[in-house]
Image (cartoon, rainbow, N blue to C red):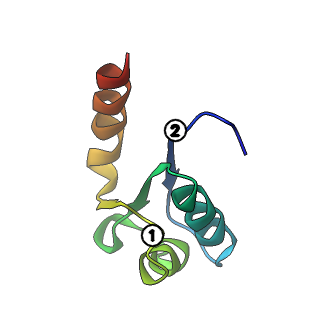
Amino acid sequence: YWSRKGTAVLLTGMGRDGALGLKELRSKGWHTIAQNKQSCVVYGMPKAAVEMDSAVEILPLSEIGSTLIRRIVSSA
């Protein structure tokens, strides 16, 4: 993993591998975001992230972009 902390986003999909990666990043101090159920085409991987407590935030797709922009601007 990168030595500098960042933000990671997990979007719609199937499986658990992304959720496991998100959990590892969160444990290293990263800010983690998972897409919410209502805006997912397939909620499998984001659901796994929520169940594993991998996500700091759970957001609709329509809010993820603006959240990333705010985080980037505030860290500059």
- Percent across and percent down for residue 46 are 48, 71
Q: Residue at x 33, y 28 (%)?
A: 69
Q: Is residue 36 left or right of residue 46?
A: left
- Percent across and percent down for residue 55 are 42, 64
The C terminus: image quadrant? top left
Kind of residue at disc 2: Gly
- Badge 2 marks a residue whose secondary structure is loop
Q: Residue at x 28, y 35 (%)?
A: 66
- Percent across and percent down for residue 19 are 58, 70
In the image as oriented, which residue stretches furthest toward the right? Answer: 1
Q: CA distance from mark 1 to mark 2?
A: 26 Å
Q: Quadrant of residue 57?
A: bottom left
- Percent across and percent down for residue 34 are 42, 61
Whichever of callouts 1 and 2 sits on the residue coming sooner in the sequence is 2
Q: Quadrant of residue 65?
A: top left
- Reading the image, the residue beneath label 2 is 6
- Reading the image, the residue beneath label 1 is 41
Q: Residue at x 29, y 58 (%)?
A: 60
Q: Which is closer to the viewer, label 1 or label 2? A: 2
